[in-house]
Image (cartoon, coloured by chain):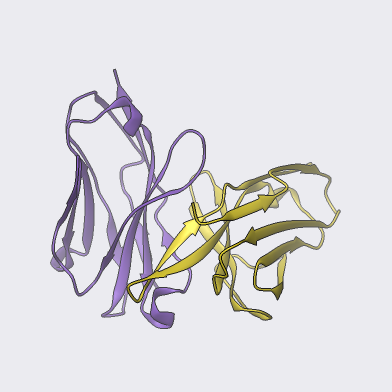
Chain colours: A purple, B yellow
Amino acid sequence: AQKVTQAQTEISVVEKEDVTLDCVYETRDTTYYLFWYKQPPSGELVFLIRRNSFDEQNEISGRYSWNFQKSTSSFNFTITASQVVDSAVYFCALSEATGGGADGLTFGKGTHLIIQP
Amino acid sequence: DAGITQSPRHKVTETGTPVTLRCHQTENHRYMYWYRQDPGHGLRLIHYSYGVKDTDKGEVSDGYSVSRSKTEDFLLTLESATSSQTSVYFCAISEELAGQETQYFGPGTRLLVL
């Protein structure tokens, strides 16, 4: 069975600090897909990134970066120079290869990130 | 914007009453999903559909049924609502980009069962 663990329930940092959100996953499949979603206080779920298991390149998008390490089954998310608008709950999720990745997602419990001005 | 709407957005009902939530999409996506979000649990998959009249159970399907008679609509029914089904319900579609599927979510329905 697949599982996603986000051990950090809540993180609070001061604006402009860098912050890393941890995600550890378990799966028996050799091909799988990892995702990060953001849920701001308004409640909608916003897709941030998708990573395939066969692509271990790290990704950077502006102040956001993702570090994928198959050896440790981790897919961590770093926000550089955090801003108040980054305050949200962040979810890591996993989908296995069956169905081409169109099966349902298994989510972690989320990390509530608070950026203090 | 993946063109997903959910109705109603908020609902209060009483234990034992039937409730149907609707998810509507406008872009002809094949795959649709229902999740529930509860504090301390993240999101959990209830049911999903891979085409008209083709559905399957997710992790927490007990007490729920679904129907998909048209590509654009995916209905979630609570036959007899219980207080444990108080939750926020999210619908999602899967969009294929470059041969890879990514799920996008609707705005959510907040359901309170008294």
Question: Which residue is located at x 13 percent, y 68 percent?
Answer: A71
Expressed as whole percent of the image width and height from the top left, the position of residue B55 reads 63, 78
Indicate the quadrant where residue A50 lies.
Answer: bottom left
Question: Which residue is located at x 31 percent, y 48 percent?
Answer: A7
Expressed as whole percent of the image width and height from the top left, the position of residue A33 reads 32, 69
Expressed as whole percent of the image width and height from the top left, the position of residue B7 reads 71, 50
> Left of B33 or right of it: where is A82?
left
> Left of A75 or right of it: where is B50?
right
Which residue is nearer to you in this view: A68 or B85?
A: A68
> Left of B65 or right of it: where is B46?
left
Which image quarter holds the N terminus of chain A?
bottom left
Q: Is residue A64 above or below residue A17?
A: below
> Left of B7 or right of it: where is A25?
left
Which residue is nearer to you in this view: A100 or A19?
A: A100
Q: Is residue B13 above or below residue A101?
A: above
Expressed as whole percent of the image width and height from the top left, the position of residue A113 reads 34, 34
Question: Which residue is located at x 55 percent, y 47 percent?
Answer: B38
Which residue is nearer to you in this view: B53 or A72?
A: B53
Indicate the quadrant where residue A98 lies.
Answer: bottom left
Question: Which residue is located at x 29 percent, y 17 percent?
Answer: A117
Indicate the quadrant where residue B16 lies.
Answer: bottom right
Count of numbered circles on the image: 0
> Which residue, as the protein is rendered here, is positioned at the far top?
A117
